[in-house]
Amino acid sequence: MKKVHLGDDGKSTRDNCERDWKDSPFFEAVGEIDELISWISLLITYVPEFKNELERIQKTLFKVNSGFYQNKKVEIDDEIKFLKNKTNEYWDKCGPITKFIIPGGTREASICHITRTVCRRAERKLVRKIKSDIEAHKEKLIFLNRLSDYFYTLARYINKLKNVEDKFL
């Protein structure tokens, strides 16, 4: 484990022992994923019935961040399939939509929507950092894109379970 208090100068250390500014695109991206993991932790406290799948997602996000830190591909194809399957399962239970949904409903669904938007922001920050070498990190982008779809659909499903109808524009 790294020693703490080394960032008092506005810089932090990457895995390759390089020092970089804390507001660098690299640290912006890993920080957004870290925030996403924390929002998922909060969500788990409100929807313990989804704890197993949400913790699985958190573990995958740690893999994504680790792969980003080490500039390595991560094997997450099974996790991408998992997200796609869960999203489809919940979508099928909620039914199709033809209008934009206004985020909200239950507190739990609202937290899902916040988590979704944090996920989208993390995806944008990751793209900003890696767009010159997007193929090397393609699986990370695919995972984050599927993950935001998952949280959108999970919010709808949670509202349905609680008998709260989606609000449309």
Image (spheres, grey):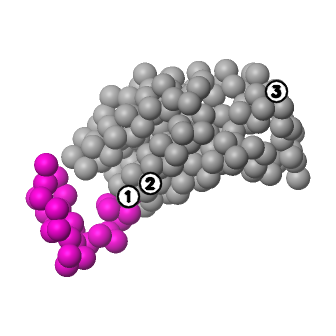
Task: Name the residue located 76 percent from the left edge and 22 percent from the top edge.
Answer: 93
Residue 3 image offset from top left, x and y in percent: 12, 59
Q: CA distance from mark 2 to mark 3?
A: 31 Å
Q: Are marks 1 and 2 in contact (CB under 8 Å)?
A: yes
Residue 28 image offset from top left, x and y in percent: 38, 63
Task: Name the residue located 25 percent from the left edge and 50 percent from the top edge.
Answer: 69
Q: Quadrant of residue 138?
A: top left
Q: Residues within 10 Å of mark 2 (few under 14, many from 20)?
A: some
Location of mark 1 (residue): 31
Location of mark 2 (residue): 35
Q: Is residue 138 visible?
A: no
Tell me the SS state at disc 2.
Answer: helix
Question: What amino acid type should be assigned to the residue bearing mark 2?
Answer: Glu
Q: Are marks 1 and 3 in contact (CB under 8 Å)?
A: no
Tell me the SS state at disc 3.
Answer: loop
Question: What amino acid type should be assigned to the residue bearing mark 3?
Answer: Gly
Q: Is residue 17 visible?
A: yes
Q: Is residue 23 magenta?
A: yes
Task: Name the residue located 24 percent from the left edge and 76 percent from the top edge.
Answer: 10
Q: CA distance from mark 1 to mark 3?
A: 35 Å
Q: Is residue 167 left or right of residue 154?
A: right
Q: Is residue 78 left or right of residue 24?
A: right
Location of mark 3 (residue): 95
